[in-house]
Amino acid sequence: MIARGKNSLLIGAALMLVILLIAPHLFYPVFLMKVLCFALFACAFNLLLGYVGLLSFGHAAFFGSAGYITAHMVKALDFNPVAGILCGVVVSSLLGLVIGWLAIRRSGIYFAMITLGFAQVIYFLSLQLKFTGGEDGIQGVPRGTLFGLVDLTDTMSMYYFVMVIFLCGFWLIYRTINSPFGQVLKAIRENEPRARSLGYDTDRFKLMAFVISAALSGLAGGTKSLVFQLASLTDVNWHMSGEVVLMTLLGGMGTIFGPAIGALLVVTLNNYLAGFGSWVTIIIGAIFVTCVLAFRRGIVGEILEKVRTWPTRGKG
Amino acid sequence: MMIQVFGVPIQALLGQLLIGLINGSFYAILSLGLAIIFGLLNIINFTHGAQYMLGAFAAWMSLTYLGVNYWVGLILAPLIVGAFGILMERLMLRRLYHLDHLYGLLLTFGLALVLEGVFRQLYGVSGLSYTIPDIFQGGVNLGFMFLPYYRAWVIVASLTVCFATWFVIERTKLGAYLRAATENPELLQAFGVNVPLMITLTFGYGVALAGFAGVLAAPIYQVTPVMGSNLIIVVFAVVVIGGMGSILGSIVTGIALGLIEGMTKVFYPEASGVVVFVIMALVLLLRPAGLFGREK
C-alpha cells in the first residue's frame, strides 16, 4: 500500500514536470506564471489547513506584504530579483512569527477570526505607509537579470525562473509533510490533547508550521510581484485570503496536488470572468457553498477516495 | 470660551465620542447576534455583515419601490432578513452540524460573497442614500455640542434592543430554555423541548438583529453592497476581545470599543482603523479567552 502510494506520487510528480515543461508552448506563459504563483500560495496554505487543521483567514497578509517588500527592494533599492524575493520571504516569515504567536493562543473559529483581524491591520498599513503607494500600489517593478546572466524581461526565462521557484517550494512542502515533524503536525490535527500527552509541545509545532506556511506564501507573493511588475492592494485584501481557502477546498485539503489544481481552476475562472463585473464574486461564493455542502474532500480528495474504495467495491 | 482637553477642543472630542457611541451600538447589536448564534449553533456566521447590508437594502428598496415609510421598514426589513436566515439554516446549515465548526464558517463566507456580488451586480458600488425620516430632521444644541435627532434615536433604539434581548435571555423562561440548550441540547430535548425549532428561530433572530442594525444604519451611512464586509471584520475582533460567553459582555465590549475608536480618531487619527485589532492583540496576550469569555 505504501509502495503503491509512493509510486503514484512519483508518477504524479513526473507528470507535473512534463506538463510544466510543455505548457508554456501551448498556453500564454504569463497566465501560467500566475497559476504557478497561486498554486504555491495554495500549497503553503494547505500545509496549515490540511495538515495541522488550522484555518487561517488572513494569509493574504503574507502573500501581499512580501509582494510589496520585493517590489520596493527591486524598484527603489536596485536589489537583484533573488535578493528582492528573499527580503519578501524574510518579512513575511517575521509577520508569520508575530501573528502566529498571538493567534495560536486560540483555536478553531477564533483562530480564523484573529488571523482575519491581523490581516486587516496589514491591509491598513499597506494603504497608509509611504513606500506602498496607497491605492496605486508599486507599479513598473523591473524584473532585472538573474545573477547577471539571465535576462528576466524575456517571458520564457521568467517562466522557467518561476517554475524553479514553484518546484523548490513544492518540494519543501512535500518534505515537511513527510518528515517526523510532519507526522507530529498530523497528530496535532487528529487529536491535539493526545499529541500533548505524548510530550510534544504542540504550540511550538503549530507556530513552526505557521511560520513555514507564511514564508512560502511570501515566496509566492514576492514572485508574483515580479511576474506582473506590480504590487497592489488586491493581494492583501481579505478577498485574497478567501480565494486561497477556496483553492485549497476545491482541489482537496490535505492532499499534495489538490491545492495546485484548485489554484489552476480558480485562476482560470478569474481570467474568463474578468470582464463580467461581480459575477466572479457570485460564482466563487457559489462554488464555496457547493464544496462545503456536497464536495468536502475536494477534487483530488474525491478521486483518491474512489481509487481507495474501488477494489473492495469490485469484489463486492 | 473654548474648553480644551489635552489640547483638543471639547466640541471635537464630544463629536467623535458621539460617532464612536453610534459605531459602538452597531458593534454591540452585531456581536450580540453573533454570540447568540454561536452559543446555540456553534458556528460563526460570516454572512452577518451581508445580512446587515441586506437589512439596509430591504429598507431602501421598500422605500424606493413601494413607498413604505421608515417605521414600517424598521419592522419589515428585519423580518425579511430573519426569514432569509431561517431558510438558510433549514436548507444548508442544518446539514453541517455533525461536522467541524470550520465548515459552517466556510459556508457562510461563500454565501456572504454571493449576496455581496448579487447586490454589486444590481446596484454597483457607489452608495445609495436613504433620507432621514421627517420626524428626525434637525437636532438639538446641547450647549457643548450639536446632537442630530436621528443619531440620538439610533443610540436609544439599538441599546433598547440589546438590553431587551439580554433581559429575555437572562430573565425569562424562554431565555432559560435557550441557556439550557446552549449547555446541553440533548438533555433539553429529552425533556420534550423542540430543540431543532429553537435553533432555527434563534438563528433567525440573530440574523434579524443584523437586519435591524442595517435599517438603523441606512440613513447615516451610504447604502452600499460592501457596507457589511469591512464592518464584520471589526465585529469579529470585538467578539474575540469580549469572548462569546456572556450576552452583557458582548454589548459592553461593543460600545466600549466604539468609544475607544472615536477617541483614537481625535488623538491619533492614523491609528483609528487598527486600534480595535491592537486591543485584540493585547487581550490575546493578557487574557486569551477574552474579557468575558470562558475557556471551553
Image (cartoon, rainbow, N blue to C red):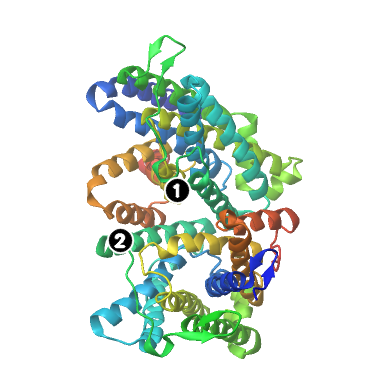
- How crowded is the residue under tag 1: few (<14 C-alpha within 10 Å), some, or many (20+)? many
In this rendering, is residue A263 above or below A86?
below
- The amino acid sitting under disc 1 is Asn
Secondary structure under badge 2?
helix
| Image coords of residue A171 (percent x, y) | 50, 25
Residue at screen point 62% across, 67% down: B257
Q: Is residue A196 visible?
A: yes
Identify the residue under disc 1: A237
Label 2 resides on the chain identified as B
Label 1 resides on the chain identified as A
Identify the residue under disc 2: B120
| Image coords of residue B143 (percent x, y) | 59, 84
In this rendering, is residue B246 above or below A229?
below
In this rendering, is residue A265 above or below B73?
above
Quick check: do tags 2 and 1 share a chain?
A: no
- Judge from the rendering whether residue B288 lies leftward or rightward of residue B181; answer left or right: right
Secondary structure under badge 1?
loop
The alpha-carbon separation of the residues under discs 2 and 1 comes to 17 Å
Residue at screen point 46% across, 74% down: B210
- The amino acid sitting under disc 2 is Arg
Camera-side residue: A241 or A245?
A: A241
- How crowded is the residue under tag 2: few (<14 C-alpha within 10 Å), some, or many (20+)? many
View extreme (front): residue? B1
- Judge from the rendering whether residue A189 lies leftward or rightward of residue A134; answer left or right: right
Residue at screen point 53% across, 64% down: B43
Q: Which corner quadrant holds the C terminus of chain B?
A: bottom right
Quarter of the rendering containing residue B92? bottom left
